[in-house]
Image: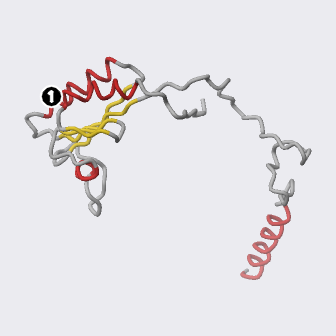
């Protein structure tokens, strides 16, 4: 019985490896899915194209807030972040990192919490505190909207397109 199983397994392995073959050699370093002419290589056509590239990208801003449910001043930070997001729909996004409550982040027990990490990296002295586009940190939540608006007025340096399955 063991001999039959061994022979069957060996036959499957041989059949599997012999079925695999390389369609196109890539020894010249060109994209094997592009042009067949090695002197004029072209990129392959996307499977689901995004459409034409825009002449200019739209600048976005992200406000990251260090907060906690037990913090008495934190609703003011959430309110100001919400106002900045609503004033610039699809351009300003808000993220709240909770510390020491049931809404705390998903970091595991072996790392620091994201709130502590945010506070340490950007010299936020307590909660509520925040940073806009990871550039300008402030414990004054009244300035987050103006800082986000200032970021939106800058020229973006790039863009990102994502293709998702339907």
Q: Is residue 40 left or right of residue 4?
A: right
Q: Quadrant of residue 40?
A: top right
The foreground one among 26 and 17 is 26
Query: Dot 1 corresponds to which residue?
Result: 76
* Residue 18 place in picture, x, y as percent: 85, 65
Picture quadrant where residue 124 is located: top left
Q: Is residue 122 above or below residue 53?
A: below
Residue nearest the viewer, comparing 3 with 140: 140
User: Among all residues in the image, which is located at the extreme left?
Assistant: 72
In this rendering, the count of numbered labels is 1
Outermost residue, bottom direction?
Answer: 3
Looking at the picture, how far across and down is residue 102, in whole percent?
19, 44
At 30% from the left edge and 53% from the top edge, which residue is drawn? 107
The way the protein has been coloured in the rendering is: secondary structure
Q: Which sits in the foreground, 132 or 75?
A: 132
In the structure shown, which secondary structural element does the residue marked by tag 1 occupy? helix
Residue appearing at x 38%, y 29% in the figure: 151
Q: Is residue 55 above or below residue 68?
A: above
Residue positioned most to the top: 87
Question: Could you say which quadrant of the image residue 52 lies in?
Answer: top right
Tell me if mark 1 has few (under 14), some (14-19) or many (20+) residues whose alpha carbon lies within 10 angstroms of its own.
few
Residue at x-position 19% and y-position 31%: 141
Q: Measured along the vertical axis of the image, is residue 146 above or below residue 2?
A: above
Is 146 left, or right, of 14 in this rendering? left
Q: Position of residue 6 (x, y in %)?
A: 75, 78
- The quadrant in which the N terminus is found is bottom right
* Residue 109 relative to residue 68: left or right: right
Quadrant, the C terminus: top right
Q: Position of residue 12 (x, y in %)?
A: 79, 68
What residue lies at 10% left-to-right and 33% top-to-bottom?
73
């Amino acid at each position: 019985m063991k001999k039959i199983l061994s022979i069957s397994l060996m036959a499957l392995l041989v059949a599997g490896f012999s079925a695999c073959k390389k369609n196109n050699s890539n020894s010249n370093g060109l994209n094997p899915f592009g042009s067949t002419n090695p002197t004029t290589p072209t990129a392959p056509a996307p499977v689901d194209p995004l459409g034409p590239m825009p002449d200019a990208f739209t600048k976005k801003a992200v406000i990251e807030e260090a907060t906690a449910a037990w913090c008495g001043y934190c609703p003011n930070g959430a309110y100001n972040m919400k106002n900045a997001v609503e004033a610039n729909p699809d351009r300003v996004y808000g993220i709240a990192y909770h510390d020491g409550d049931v809404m705390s982040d998903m970091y595991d027990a072996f790392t620091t919490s994201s709130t502590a990490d945010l506070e340490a990296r950007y010299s936020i002295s307590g909660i509520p505190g925040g940073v806009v586009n990871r550039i300008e940190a402030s414990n004054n939540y009244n300035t987050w909207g103006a800082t986000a608006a200032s970021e939106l007025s800058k020229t973006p340096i790039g863009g990102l397109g994502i293709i998702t399955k339907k």
